[in-house]
Amino acid sequence: MIVLSEADIRALIRPTEAVALAVEAFRLTAAGSALALRGDLRAEEPRRGCLLLTGSAGPDSLSIKSNVHAQPETPDAPRRWASLLTLWDWQRAEPRALISAGLFNEHRTAAGFAAGLDRLAAPDATTAAIFGAGRSAPLAALYLKIARPSLKRLYLVGRSPQRLAALAANLAGEPAMADVELITTATPAEAVAASEIVVTVTTSEEPVFPGKAARPGACIVLGGANRPGAREADDELIRRADIYLDARADAFAKAGDLVQSKASGALDPARIRAEIGALPGGALPFSPGADLTVFKSMGLPLQDVLLAEALVTKALACGLGTPVDLQGAP
């Protein structure tokens, strides 16, 4: 078995490969060719939780990932968070790798957004908005630029001016973003009204922008609110939208944007059009029935499997990672 550190992941991962693997994960999931399990363990006082994602693409592959988080002891302290992924040869019941999955998760998630945008967003989009300025935002922006090289203006929207300034400074230093104007002063309504693409990567419990302000024809990726009690989209946005999913399984149990809009009556089940992997390749291969398109991204365990397999294969080929003998042989 080998252990891959955060530095190893940084050296091994390639965004275009991650997007291609996300597309394949969507396709296999829509075809029913994958096994997956998602669990969510939560406790209070002190507040803490664990998201467990398990997936397999065949008898030789199994990934088990745990995202563990804990509430800080003081309100101003950052939330504690860590993630580990174990990749197994399932047929032999042998662990192949233990992966530190912090950076891995950010790439995997952003690659899924980009794969969805490839199918759903206008191919020549020039204006977009990112809601959220946390750990997911920088790669969400970079993968958005990969999906739509035509991007020229990006609105950054969040609750903390300091974090937005830091995010803007981070992105301004990225060569891929050199021709993109970064705007941090727009209100949520102004940002969505101007944007052809909107990506939300927040931990918000409440809608982050008014749905009535969204630009007709926009594609909106809802990437947060992956628990029933949270949402990023209001009822007005859901009423306007055709909705696509990465997977139907658990969507109405875990995705707060869908759970709450269904409970209020705002969601017409007929507007859930398809799993993203069931759509043919190429942008906009269909005629939307609504004036907005929403991609509700929960993240697929199969994305973990395929990306982990690719990284472990490359690590073994180039000598990265730390070998570990679990049997303790000399």
Image: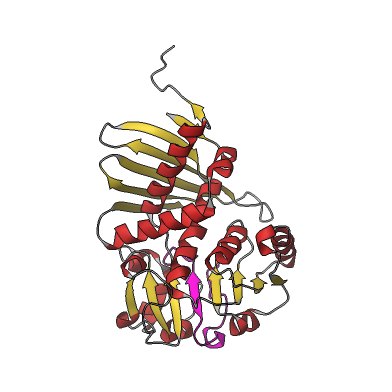
Of residues 18 and 123, which is closer to you in this image? Answer: 123
Which color scheme does this rendered protein use?
secondary structure
Q: 182 above or below 54?
A: below
Residue lying farthest top? Answer: 330
Q: 255 above or below 111?
A: below
Residue 271: horizontal and vertical position, in percent?
Answer: 34, 81
265 on left or right of 194? left
* Span highlighted in magenta in the image: 201-229
Residue 67: horizontal and vertical position, in percent?
Answer: 47, 48
Q: 152 above or below 217?
A: above
Residue 8 in view in this figure: yes
Of residues 296 and 320, which is closer to you in this image? Answer: 320
Q: How many marks?
A: 0
- Whether residue 225 appears in magenta in the rendering, the answer is yes
The rendered magenta stretch, by its main secondary structure, is classed as loop
Residue shown at 47%/83% (left/top)? Answer: 237
- Whether residue 260 appears in magenta in the rendering, the answer is no
Residue 47 in view in this figure: no
Task: Report the quarter where the N terminus lies.
Answer: top left
Task: Report the quarter where the C terminus lies.
Answer: top left
308 on left or right of 273? right
Residue 163: horizontal and vertical position, in percent?
Answer: 71, 62
Residue shown at 60%/70% (left/top)? Answer: 130
Residue 85: horizontal and vertical position, in percent?
Answer: 44, 42
